[in-house]
Amino acid sequence: MGQQTEFEPGDKVPNNGHYIEVGETAFHMGIENPQMVELERGDTFPDTTNKDRKWKLKRKGR
């Protein structure tokens, strides 16, 4: 079983880090002005700007 990579608003944060809002299907195209948040393990993910978006851990260098 793999580790979950996308999270919905209200989910618990699994690891400390910077998370970025991603689109529902075209993640490779990106979205304009995505929200970015810094969260700690155990926090709750905030609402996204669109019901079809999710949170994803922002990798270093991106």
Image (cartoon, rainbow, N blue to C red):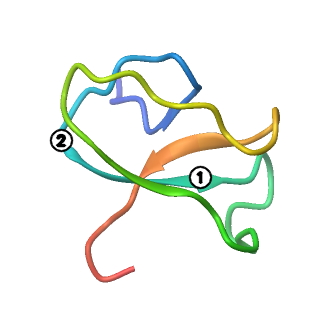
Tag 2 or tag 1, which sits nearer the N-term?
2
Q: Secondary structure at mark 2?
A: loop
Q: Quadrant of residue 4?
A: top left
**Residue 40 screen position, x and y as percent:** 20, 35
**Residue 62 screen position, x and y as percent:** 39, 79
In screen coordinates, is 36 left or right of 41?
right
Q: Quadrant of residue 51?
A: top right
Determine whether 61 is above or below 18 in the image: below
- Of residues 49 and 22, the one nearer the viewer is 49
Q: Residue furthest bottom?
A: 61
In screen coordinates, is 10 left or right of 58?
right
Q: Amino acid at mark 2?
A: Asn
Q: Amino acid at mark 1?
A: Glu
Q: Residue at x 30, y 83 (%)?
A: 61
Q: Which residue is mark 1?
A: 21
Are the residues at dot 1 and dot 2 in contact (C-beta closer than 8 Å)?
A: no
**Residue 39 screen position, x and y as percent:** 28, 41
Q: Residues within 10 Å of mark 1 (few under 14, many from 20)?
A: many
In screen coordinates, is 20 left or right of 62?
right
- Of residues 11 and 35, the one nearer the viewer is 35
Q: Residues within 10 Å of mark 2 (few under 14, many from 20)?
A: few
Q: Quadrant of residue 24?
A: top right
**Residue 41 screen position, x and y as percent:** 19, 28
Q: Residue at x 44, y 39 (%)?
A: 5
Per the rendering, the mark at residue 16 is: 2
Per the rendering, the mark at residue 43 is: none
Give the alpha-carbon distance from disc 1 to disc 2, as whole Å: 16 Å
